Image (spheres, grey):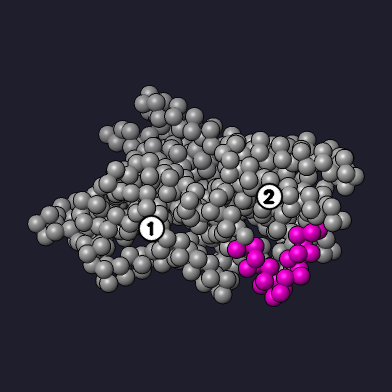
Amino acid sequence: MILQETLDILMFATACVLLLSGFPVAFTLAGTALIFAGLGHMLGVFDVSFLGAFPQRIFGTMTNEVLMAVPLFVFMGVMLERSKVAEELLDSMVKLFGNLRGGLGISVTIVGALLAASTGIVGATVVTMGLLALPTMIRRGYDPALAAGSITSAGTLGQIIPPSIVLVLLGDVLSSSYQDAQRQLGNWTATPLSVGDLFAGALLPGLGLVLLYIIYQIAVAIFRPHAAPAIPKEELVSEEERREALHHTLHAVIPPVVLIIAVLGSIMAGVATPTEAAGVGALGATLLAGLRLDENRPLPIYAGGAALVLALILTALFDLRLGRDQIALGEQVAIAVAALCCLVLGWGVLVSLKRTLATGTLTAVGRSTLEITSMVFVILIGAALFSLVFRGLGGDDAVHQLLSNLPGGAVGAIIAVMLVMFILGFFLDFIEITFVVVPIVAPALFLLGVDPVWLGVMMAINLQTSFLTPPFGFALFYLRGVAPASITTKQIYKGAIPFVGIQILGLLILSLFPAIATWLPGIIFG
């Protein structure tokens, strides 16, 4: 038993060290697992029959409908990023709020929140806003650290505001752990945890985090006005230009907001699963990209978008299934209208695909989607082998025993897990933590009676923090790559620290008031 526990600890420590060396994550996890499986077998503490379950795990990943949402949401995010939504939003917001102290920082946070709900890709958001907003903020006299911190923190909002890839991956991992824990407790009728639950649970905490960012920006503008000055009066836009900026803002905001409402609304209304809603998002993003590429001929796009919304409404109001013995007259009419909507939507999508293909946008989006999705799933497979060997060495029992014996019971266990995840976030990527750490600790926490939705949202915010924590915060690296030479790495790190503190504050608030995460899923899904 002691030998098994020693191998578990060594296995986890070895994986962490090798991950820091920069070797590909998937091969690091799988290779470490195979080495320790061999060591365990030679020492007589590991049964190699455990490895027989590995092909089944891979097949389960391939047939997992929840994980099918990953490439669809990635496609949606990359397509929207390529359709220049961020550029329009930032330009318009600067004109609207630039005359306020701290207005540029607030604009960046609002745009980051909108992009988070529509694209959800941290790298694209940080790079885009770094190229567009950072030079403007520096030119207007903003403190470089504050400007850098505002952009990097706003870019990470895509990890907590749904639809989020992190929530999809966490939902899949936590769902399996929750079901296993409930079966161990003898509860065979437990309501399964879904990605939709996490989407609903993360909405209010995500918006709360945006509010905390804005409050911080306002506080800086009040107490350190030189760090967040307003645009000089001689450079202010006229009232007519302001009205024009408002018009451009609505033009830039309304289509993505309609798409966000269609995606999240279809999930929360029970009309579509997260995977089906991701398909809706991919179609909507394609239509929006087609509109942006040729706004002089908008009819096919508007018709396709209206048909998509109408089809969702009909799905919510009527039973559109065809394979039934009896179909009421009203349902027959609804089915006919839905079929017509599909034809109109197909027309709009074909026009959009033609436009995006002609400009090379579709090719670039497809390539980016393939690269990101491949990376996620290869890591997932490597992590599956790692967790399989870890459990074969008795690691899950050891973790459960450790967390159960901590002072404070479930509260002490939660604090320990959150602290470990926070520290690992300084060195590891969120995908690595999700696939390696979460499957190890989640079952033990569920056995202690922790609410799965609340735990998932807490973990999501904690993982979001990993993008901002030096020395390996990815958002910091993304901004460093596009920041002017006058912005030092020290200033970028310094600017991120207050926002890391704000995220920790958000975690504390959520830990004290779990209903922030559990109320909305309870209202929507019962």
- Residue under pointer 2: 13
| Magenta stretch bounds | 397-419
282 vs 245: above or below: above
Visible residue check, residue 350: yes
Q: Is residue 43 left or right of residue 343?
A: right
Secondary element type, mark 2: helix
Q: Residue at x 27, y 58 (%)?
A: 143
Secondary element type, mark 1: helix
- Residue under pointer 1: 494
Coordinates of residue 270 in the picture (x, y in percent): 59, 55
Visible residue check, residue 284: no
Q: Nearer the viewer, residue 419 or 380?
A: 419
Coordinates of residue 103 in the picture (x, y in percent): 26, 61
Q: Nearer the viewer, residue 114 or 421?
A: 421
What's the residue type where badge 1 is placed? Lys
Sequence-wise, the earlier of marks 1 and 2 is 2
| Quarter of the rendering containing residue 290 | top left
Magenta part mainly helix, strand or loop?
helix
Q: Residue at x 68, y 68 (%)?
A: 413
